Amino acid sequence: MLHDADAAKLRLWLRLSIGANVASGLAVLVLGYGLLIFVVDEPAEVEGVSLSARSDADGDGKSDDPRAEMRAFFTRTAGLLDRAARRHGTNPADVLPTREQIDAAVESRSIHSMESEMVLQKLREGYDYYNLDWPLVMPHQ
């Protein structure tokens, strides 16, 4: 049979264990929330897209020169196509835009210019021919 002193001790231990569980649960929630904030606040890094590629909506008032980002995109995209052509025993010059076409597209400073559209069309045709996935991230200019 349980005496009053033993029952009081059990109630005390029960309260302490519940309190400890609640405290540890709150600590886990706070740490989880802190981790979530840390992860969400980190800038996303996507291959080929620099943080300098952000628009003027960032409030800095500066307009970044898109040529470096465009050249990196065209070079990376053409590089993948070049490797696919070589793997298939095809002359890469048959499926790649010329260096002059890429230079003209980059100098246009717009991914929507006629020069850029010609380069993109040539690259897309090659990607379709070799059944490659088209890059999801493109320069926004």
Image (spheres, rainbow, N blue to C red):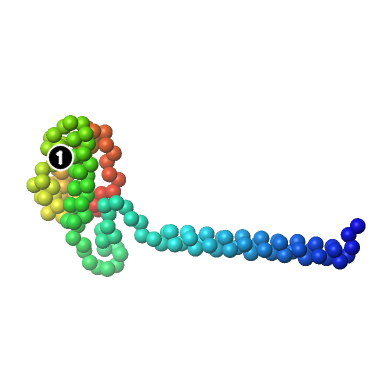
Name the side, left or right, on which 72 lies relative to 45: left
Quadrant position of the N terminus in the picture:
bottom right
The answer to whether 30 is drawn above or below residue 119 in the figure is: below
Left or right of 60? Residue 99 is left
Residue 105 x %, y %: 13, 49
For residue 94, above or below residue 42? above
> Local crowd at mark 1 within 10 Å, few (<14), some, or many (≥20)?
many
At horizontal 13% and vertical 47% (from top left) the residue drawn is: 102
Number of marks in the image? 1
Residue 85 sits in which quadrant? top left
Q: Residue furthest left?
A: 100
Q: Is residue 125 visible?
A: no
Looking at the picture, which amino acid does disc 1 mark? Answer: Leu
Depth order, front residue of 6/59: 6
Front in this rendered view, residue 139 or 130: 130
Give residue 84's quadrant in the image.
top left
Which residue appears at 81% of the width and 65% of the height?
9
Q: Is residue 19 left or right of residue 125?
A: right
The reply to whether residue 75 is visible in this rendering is yes
Q: Position of residue 42 (x, y in %)?
A: 39, 61
The residue identified by callout 1 is 96
